Image (cartoon, rainbow, N blue to C red):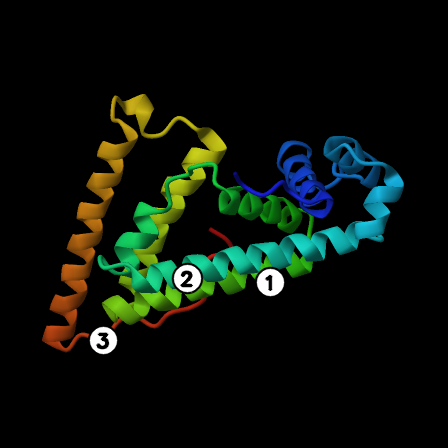
Amino acid sequence: MPAKPSARDKILTAFEALLIDEGERGATMDAVAAQAGVSKGGLLYHFRNKEAMELALLQKLRTQADADIEAMVADPDGPSMYFVRESVYAGSGFDHTLIAAMRLAQSSEIDARAELQRIHQQWFELIVGEVGDRSIARAIMLLGDGLYYNAILAGIWPEDAGMGKQESVEGLLEVVQMLKGQATSNAGSGRPGAPGGQPPADR
C-alpha cells in the first residue's frame, strides 16, 4: 500500500489546490489549514508563513522537473518527441505543482517566474542539442506549449474539431519528425540555426 501522506505533504497539496482553484489571493493560511484538515497551529508547525509554503512548493517543483529532465534525456525517441508527447495534460502530480507555480507567477511572485524560466530553459536547451537549430527547437516547444495550454485553459481542443486527443498528438509528433528532418537538412546545407533568444517563461 502507498505510504500515507504526511501532514506537511497534505498541507502542500492543499496549497496547490487552492492556488489552482482560487488563485494566490484565495490561498490564505486559514484556507490552506481548512483544506488540509489541520489546525492553524498544525500548519504553523510546518510552515511559519505563506512565503515558506511558496518556497516549499517551488522546491517540490524543482525536484519533479529534474526527474522529468532525466526522463527526457533518457527517452529513446529523443527530447523533442518526449516534450510534445508528454505535453498532454494528465492531471499528474507534476501537472498540479506546475500549474500552482504558474498561479504564483501570475501574481508577480518573482521566485516562481525564475523557477519556471529555469525549467523551460532546460527543456529548450535539450531540444536545441538534439536538432541543432534554435528556431526549429522553439517551434517544437511551441507545439508542446500549445497542446498543454489548450488542455488546461480551454479544455476543448482538439476534441471540438472531431479529433481525439491521441490522434491529435500523433499528428503533432509527425510534425516534430518533419521539423527534425528540416533541421538535419539545414545542417547539411550549411545553413546555421537562427540566433536564439529566450524561450517563453513557462510551459
The tag earlier along the polypeptide, 2 or 1, is 2
The tag earlier along the polypeptide, 2 or 3, is 2
Name the foreground residue: 190 vs 55. 55
> Hey, what amino acid is under mark 1?
Ala
Disc 2 vs disc 3: which is toward the camera?
Answer: 2
**Location of residue 170 in the rendering, given as x and y in whole percent from the top left corner:** 21, 40
Disc 2 vs disc 1: which is toward the camera?
Answer: 2
Furthest toward the right, the residue is 41
Residue 69 badge: 2
CA gap, disc 3 and disc 1: 30 Å
**Location of residue 99 in the rendering, given as x and y in whole percent from the top left corner:** 55, 43
Furthest toward the front, the residue is 1
> Hey, what amino acid is under mark 3?
Pro
The tag earlier along the polypeptide, 3 or 1, is 1
> Hey, what amino acid is under mark 2?
Ile
The quarter holding residue 129 reads bottom left
CA gap, disc 2 and disc 1: 17 Å
Residue 114 badge: 1
Residue 192 badge: 3
Residue at point 11%, 67% (across, down): 185
Residue at point 70%, 57% (across, down): 55
Check disc 3 and report its element: helix, strand or loop: loop
Check disc 2 and report its element: helix, strand or loop: helix
